[in-house]
Image: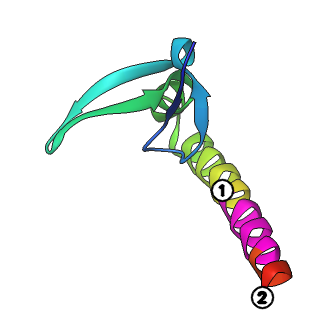
Amino acid sequence: MANRYCYYCGMMHAEEMMRVITVRNGRRWRCIRSIEAAKKSVKERDAFGREVSAFNEEMSATVKNRRACFD
């Protein structure tokens, strides 16, 4: 099973947890979790977005710290 990049949440997921979505510029992989989150209330969607943003910021900081170690 291959991992795929979710264009929506920015994380890698197992292919069975993903769906191909047709967007304006072609087809993209999107995780089921983000698809289900989009169906929820605005408050729940905002909470999901904050969770994804926090994860992405943490990953960005980790990469920056690794790069600093090699400089």
What SS does tag 1 mark? helix
Residue at 45% in and 44% down: 8
Q: Is residue 11 left or right of residue 25?
A: right
Region rendered in magenta: 56-66
Task: Tell me the quadrant of the picture where the N terminus can be found.
Answer: top right
Mark 2, residue position = 71
Q: Is residue 70 above or below residue 46?
A: below
Image x and y of residue 34, in percent: 52, 33
Q: Residue at x 82, y 76 (%)?
A: 65
Seen in the picture, residue 22 relative to 64 is either above or below; the reply is: above
Q: Which mark is residue 50?
A: 1
Amino acid type, callout 2: Asp
Q: Residue at x 52, y 36 (%)?
A: 41
x%, y% of residue 29?
39, 30
Mark 1 to mark 2: distance in Å?
A: 32 Å
Task: Farthest residue to the front: give it.
Answer: 70
Dot 2 falls on a residue whose secondary structure is loop
The type of residue carrying mark 1 is: Arg
Q: Is residue 23 left or right of residue 67?
A: left
Q: Label 1: how many residues lie within 10 Å, few (<14), some (14-19) or many (20+)?
A: few
